[in-house]
């Protein structure tokens, strides 16, 4: 069923007259599985205005950009082959088009809900810190094709990478200026986040950063070094080794350790503390050491009704471990922030601890030691691994 020409004409005129805000298509009853809505905005790509379509599916979003005329033709096509509702938002009005049960379109004008034009920056619309145009490493990592389009299978990883950089962006910008920053990513894996961090520091923030990825699997080390060489990332390298065994040559500016298992997170935190890192970022994985302590002691306290259940015991161990880690970081003068970091669809380990170096406060140090002592006594645990590494056990 064709769409009323007046609606499409209004769409075209709103763009030409610079009062177009956005367009949404809904009530989809077409053949494409799991498609729910399409949201359309005007963006600038290399100073050329285009219509950016966000296709909202049940479990993912896909964005495509079209020339203005092509985009308008696409809207006409979509409203003829499955969508039964559309709302055109302009600075003057909201124009609502609906398809009734008889197959006829009804169009009505309503008061505008927005009167301010949205910015046309493509980066702003996408809210992405990692721009994928002409980035060789993103192709070599099989995240996107030669045209800068993210592969469907890589959508979750792409969102994770950008979310990661977004979470760190403020802290990274605040890092004290130096001739060259020393950055270590411990447990780098295939290097997705390591490459993005290097790119953001050097090419977006224009900080001269030497980035080293430490990874146990030699095949991944070789792969990442090849990709770094192909991308001409001269100050990015990867070495084989474990977090426990790696010994930094001197002070660090940034230490990253994402999903280091159990006490490997403590090893990374200890290296960050002892090598005076200005920024420490960890996303802990597994919390077996403290959980074994809890299961062995089985302390009788006000919370024992929770810890008798396995799933609650696991979550309790996670919060207790990361809580003590945060206190120890604060003891050494770090300002800590614990936030949600969703890594991918296959893990529930989504807590990130971000620590920024500030000043050591002796009064606060005493309070922290008392707090750790009280927590350990309450749960009956003998120690937490980072506490032991730092030699704080005898002080609490």
Image (spheres, rainbow, N blue to C red):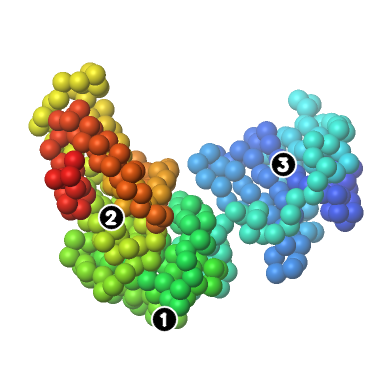
Q: Residue at x 42, y 45 (%)?
A: 337
Q: Which mark is residue 234?
A: 1
The reply to whether residue 2 is visible in this rendering is no
Q: Which residue is labeled 3 in the image?
A: 24
Kindly state the secondary structure of the residue where label 1 is placed: loop
Disc with the residue nearer the chain's start (3 vs 2): 3
What is the quadrant of the C terminus in the image?
A: top left
Label 3: how many Cα within 10 Å (few below 14, some 14–19, many 20+): some
Residue 310, horizontal then vertical, whole percent: 21, 28
State how far apart marks 1 and 2 are (Cα): 27 Å
Kindly state the secondary structure of the residue where label 3 is placed: strand
Residues 64 and 302: in front is 302
Q: Residue at x 78, y 27 (%)?
A: 100
Viewer-nearest of discs 1 and 2: 2
Specify the quadrant of the image occupied by residue 234: bottom left
Q: Which residue is labeled 2 in the image?
A: 269
Q: Is residue 53 left or right of residue 282?
A: right
């Amino acid at each position: 069923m064709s769409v009323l020409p007046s609606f499409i004409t209004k769409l075209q005129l709103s763009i030409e007259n610079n009062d177009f805000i956005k367009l949404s298509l809904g009530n989809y009853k077409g053949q494409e599985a799991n498609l729910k809505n399409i949201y359309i905005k005007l963006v600038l790509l290399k100073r050329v205005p285009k219509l950016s379509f966000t296709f909202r599916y049940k479990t993912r979003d896909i964005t495509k950009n079209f020339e203005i005329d092509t985009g308008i033709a696409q809207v006409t096509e979509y409203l003829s082959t499955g969508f039964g509702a559309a709302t055109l938002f302009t600075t003057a009005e909201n124009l609502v088009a609906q398809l009734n049960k008889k197959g006829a379109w009804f169009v009505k004008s309503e008061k505008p809900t927005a009167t301010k034009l949205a910015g046309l920056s493509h980066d702003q619309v996408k809210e992405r810190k990692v721009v994928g145009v002409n980035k060789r490493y993103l192709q070599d990592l099989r995240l996107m094709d030669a045209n800068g389009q993210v592969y469907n299978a890589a959508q979750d990883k792409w969102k994770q990478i950008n979310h990661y950089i977004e979470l760190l962006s403020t802290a990274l910008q605040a890092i004290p200026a130096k001739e060259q920053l020393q950055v270590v990513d411990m447990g780098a894996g295939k290097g997705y986040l390591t490459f993005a961090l290097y790119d953001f520091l050097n090419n977006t923030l224009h900080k001269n950063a030497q980035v080293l990825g430490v990874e146990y699997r030699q095949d991944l080390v070789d792969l990442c070094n090849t990709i770094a060489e192909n991308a001409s990332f001269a100050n990015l390298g990867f070495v084989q080794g474990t977090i426990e065994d790696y010994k930094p040559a001197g002070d660090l500016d940034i230490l990253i350790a994402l999903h280091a298992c159990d006490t490997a997170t403590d090893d990374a935190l200890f290296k960050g503390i002892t090598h005076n890192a200005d920024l420490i970022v960890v996303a802990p994985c597994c919390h077996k050491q403290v959980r074994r302590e809890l299961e062995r002691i089985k302390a009788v306290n006000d919370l024992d009704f929770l810890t008798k259940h396995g799933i609650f015991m696991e979550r309790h161990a996670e919060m207790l471990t990361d809580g003590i880690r945060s206190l120890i970081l604060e003891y050494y003068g770090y300002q800590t922030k614990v936030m949600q970091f969703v890594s991918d669809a296959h893990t529930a380990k989504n807590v990130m601890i971000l620590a920024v170096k500030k000043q050591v406060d002796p009064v606060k140090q005493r309070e922290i030691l008392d707090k750790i002592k009280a927590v350990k006594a309450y749960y009956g645990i003998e120690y937490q691994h980072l506490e032991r590494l730092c030699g704080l056990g005898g002080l609490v």
